[in-house]
Amino acid sequence: MARLSHHEIVLFLLALAVVLGAARLLGELARQFRQPAILGELVAGILLGPTLLGRLFPDASGAIFPSQGPMAVAFDGLRTVSITLFMLVAGLDVDLNTIRRQGKTASVVSLLGMVFPFVTGFLAAWFAPTLLGKEPHGDRFIFAAFIATAMSISALPVIARTLMDLNLYRSDMGMIVIAAAIFNDLVGWLVFAVLLGTTERFHGAAHGPAATIWMTLGYVLFMLTVGRGLLHRGLPWVHAHTSWPGGFLGLAFVLALVGAACTTWIGIHPIFGSFLVGVALGDSSHVREHTKKVISQFVSFFFAPLFFASIGLSVDFIGSFDLKIVSAVIFIAMIGKVLGCGLGARWAGIAQREAWSIGFCLNARGAMEIIVGLIALQAGLIGQTLFVALVVMALVTSVISGPMVTRLLRKQRQRRLVEFLSPRSFLNPLRASDRYEAIQQLCLAAGAATKLDARVIEEAVWSREKMMSTGMGKGVAVPHARIEGLSEAVVAVGLSRGGIDFDAPDGQPANVICMILTPKEDDGAQLSLLADVARTFGPEQVRQQVMQISGYTDFLAVLNTQTL
């Protein structure tokens, strides 16, 4: 049986340590500059690969990171496992209920956000293939279809992170963006899987293209219907009879690997199988936000850095860099996605600034674009020059997403929480045992303060809560809704010393519950107030002071102190 020699094992372990250490170090450095960790992880691979180390010390680079032999095979296997588990995490973030409940607005944004970049990408690749780096031997239609698909895909993890950094994740705008990104991911990966099924070079002709496509569609249908139902019914048993989080982690990883094996046998990439397993698992109400975060942290701090750093180990980013192709790819990608999503949001009735903010949010490509590009490179659909252009485009669109949204929204009038509080809508203590009771009591208080029907308010707020929990973490929750007929914003605050479960990402109960009601047509009020809640109650000492107060006057005093 072929195996690594003693010397190769030593070099393999040292190589893993070097790659993981460099990726984690540069990933954390990127975070310090408020950039995605993936940027630092990619740079680590570029520095250790043929781009730099291979040029300066080719012998050392060839010894530690060989391109052939048992060590190369071991690296390739580990990279496959890493990206398989990373896509499991990406699938867990996909909440199918979010798409269903967002209705017309998210549907229009999603549809135009797919159609516009798909059409612009296809036309550009069809009529100017050389400009986009088409290989001479490549099929023109398949190349154009790949470019169209690559231009359409967004990066849900990067988008979610951007919204969290801007305190917009739990807002209505954030929900529209997330729903549209989920739709893009599902449709984009399905189209890409079908596209791969037509390339015999990738799946080794294990099945014919037609059989591969039909089996792929069958797998998708099974996982999103029967498979999803079986997992939902089985998860309570797993939680009841296994330790947490080990039981769920074990189940998720086993199913992800089985799903990856299934799609590999079908003839498409293993990541598609693990992605759909993640979708089926994450859609269950038995999987809490904190559980998803545990899996995400485990994968993101070990497997993801190894994968993204390994990309730089196999590609020469200097030798394959072509400024003309990079510029063309970035231009086509941004025009199609920003215009499509922005016009879709305007068509759905969203105000101009918020609509274009949605466009720039969904323009972030991040890890998903890099993964698509790498698979296409391995399948022979594209060459290294176009792959490098796609990586640069993914990074550029991810980096500019946050600053562009900030610039578009910052000119709106800043609202402060204290402007809309009243003694009648302040409940201390809030006597509720769960979030439904908490929302109900806050709605009664808000109704008394505004003369609005408390039942109407409750229906709107609870409907919004069911789409996505409004627990922000750190003991704070922000249930909210836009109310027809409301002339100005209303804020109701409840303090619960025992804490109320709002399914926050950190798993902590909410002690401070701020319910925000805004006029239906006022797009800026909700975003501004949500951001102010995050700023005000972010520091731990502020939350501690709030929980020690005795009345409304003391609460105002704590809040006003934060503005000094």
Image (tube, grey):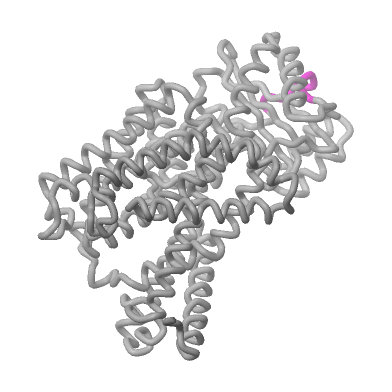
Q: Position of residue 159 (x, y in %)?
A: 46, 45
Q: Tell which residue pokes out farthest to the front in this image.
A: 1
Residue 166 in sight in this render: no
Q: Which residue is pictured at 13% across the width and 49% down the height?
A: 140
Decide: is 289 above or below 207: above
- Which quadrant would residue 510 be assigned to in this image? top right
Magenta stretch: dominant secondary structure: helix
* Viewer-side residue, 197 vs 40: 197
Q: Position of residue 88 (x, y in %)?
A: 50, 51
- Which quadrant would residue 56 be assigned to in this image? bottom left
Decide: is 146 above or below 175: below
Q: Work out which quarter of the rendered image holds the C terminus and state it.
A: top right
Q: Which residue is pictured at 58% across the width and 14% down the height?
A: 487
* Viewer-side residue, 199 vs 153: 199
Q: Position of residue 367 (x, y in %)?
A: 41, 54
Residue 239 horizontal side relative to residue 51, left or right: right
Q: Position of residue 376 (x, y in %)?
A: 28, 56
Identify the magenta region.
419-426
Residue 205 horizontal side relative to residue 525, left or right: left
Decide: is 279 above or below 50: above
- Which quadrant would residue 119 be assigned to in this image? top left
Residue 468 horizontal side relative to residue 82, left or right: right
Q: Work out which quarter of the rendered image holds the N terminus and state it.
A: bottom left
Q: Which residue is pictured at 60% across the width and 22% down the height?
A: 463
Task: Give the mark count.
Answer: 0
